[in-house]
């Protein structure tokens, strides 16, 4: 019995080893820490047998500012667990200093590859995304690549309760005048639990660690985040 329990945990332990946070910090640079709340609602489903849709709203609340990420995408199914996507996003920003006012936000386009394998009882996700970011303050386009590895391991109640771990690495592909510089950008690590409370609905709650390299600022950034996600999956 103990051997079977150990084998159940092996895929998740392997994922933890693979996604252990990768960080690139220049020697001696201080790190600024803060706490935030990220709340995400997503909906995805099929249009016929071949096509897919995806919608997302993600407000983020911090001490000094707040922003929202609004995404939509259309996809095509390549197989039962593999798809290709094309989407767009808009990120408005508000700051709390003085009179709260909306700043000009960022717009972006993205292309995405999504693969969802099963490794024993572990439900995996591999997501590779290319982004073209249209940032305020510059006319140049910032190109960024990001790769996410995720694992969800059913724990109890016929698989409705799951332990979830994921990691995502961001990398700037070019340098932009008055904007991002080429190289490592960000790493996000999440550890939490998911509860499936309906046929198409679930909730995920956990700790998200967000580290960002900021060569243009005096400090790097580390955000300790309470992340709450409510996915609605009709695929």
Image (cartoon, rainbow, N blue to C red):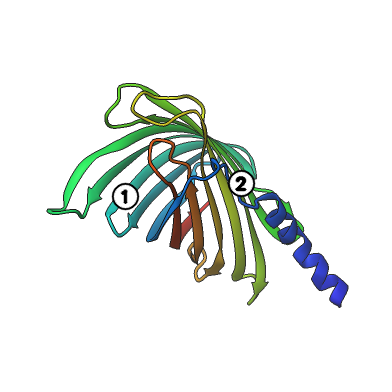
Q: Determine whether the residue tagged by mark 1 lies in a helix, strand or loop.
A: strand
Q: Is residue 163 visible to the viewer in this orientation of the structure? A: yes
Marks 1 and 2 sit apart, C-alpha to C-alpha, by 26 Å
User: How packed is label 1: few (under 14 Cα within 10 Å), some, or many (20 or more)?
Assistant: some
Q: Nearer the viewer, residue 133 or 217?
A: 217
Q: Residue 203, how many percent across, how many down?
A: 48, 66
Q: Nearer the viewer, residue 72 or 216?
A: 216
Looking at the image, is 106 positioned above or below residue 153?
above
Q: Residue at x 43, y 40 (%)?
A: 214
Marks 1 & 2, CB-CB < 8 Å contact: no
Q: Residue at x 66, y 56 (%)?
A: 123
Q: Residue at x 78, y 62 (%)?
A: 10
Q: Determine whether the residue tagged by mark 2 lies in a helix, strand or loop.
A: loop
Q: Which residue is mark 2?
A: 22
Q: Nearer the viewer, residue 125 or 19?
A: 19
Q: Is residue 228 visible to the viewer in this orientation of the structure? A: no
Q: Residue furthest left?
A: 99
Q: Residue 109, how many percent across, how many down?
A: 40, 31
Q: Residue 188, how many percent across, how many down?
A: 52, 51
Q: Is residue 136 left or right of residue 108?
A: left
Looking at the image, is 211 positioned above or below residue 161?
above
Q: Residue at x 77, y 66 (%)?
A: 8
Q: Quadrant of residue 195?
A: bottom right
Q: Which residue is mark 1?
A: 68
Q: Quadrant of residue 77?
A: top right
Q: Which of the two labelled residues, at mark 1 and mark 2, occupies the earlier sequence position?
A: 2
Q: Residue 170, how many percent across, how many down?
A: 52, 39
Q: Quadrant of residue 193?
A: bottom right
Q: Is residue 108 left or right of residue 80?
A: left
Q: Nearer the viewer, residue 219 or 230?
A: 219
């Amino acid at each position: 019995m103990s051997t079977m329990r150990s084998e159940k945990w092996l895929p998740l332990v392997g994922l933890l080893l693979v996604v252990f946070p990768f960080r690139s910090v220049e020697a001696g640079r201080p790190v600024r820490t803060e706490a935030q709340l990220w709340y995400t609602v997503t909906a995805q489903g099929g249009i016929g047998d071949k096509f897919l849709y995806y919608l997302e709203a993600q407000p983020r609340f911090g001490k000094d500012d707040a922003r929202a990420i609004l995404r939509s995408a259309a996809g095509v199914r390549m197989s039962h667990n593999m798809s290709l996507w094309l989407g767009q996003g808009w990120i408005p920003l508000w700051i709390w200093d003085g009179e709260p006012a909306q700043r000009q936000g960022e717009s972006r386009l993205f292309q995405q590859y999504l693969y969802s394998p099963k490794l024993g009882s572990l439900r995996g996700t591999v997501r590779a995304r290319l982004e073209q970011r249209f940032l305020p303050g510059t006319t140049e386009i910032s190109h960024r690549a990001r790769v996410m590895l995720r694992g969800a391991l059913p724990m109890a109640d016929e698989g409705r309760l799951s332990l979830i771990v994921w990691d995502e690495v961001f990398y700037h592909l070019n340098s932009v005048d008055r904007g991002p510089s080429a190289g490592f950008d960000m790493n996000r690590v999440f550890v939490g639990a998911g509860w499936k409370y309906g046929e198409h609905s679930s909730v995920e709650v956990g700790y998200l660690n967000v580290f960002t390299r900021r060569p243009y600022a005096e400090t790097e950034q580390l955000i300790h985040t309470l992340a709450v996600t409510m996915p609605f999956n009709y695929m």
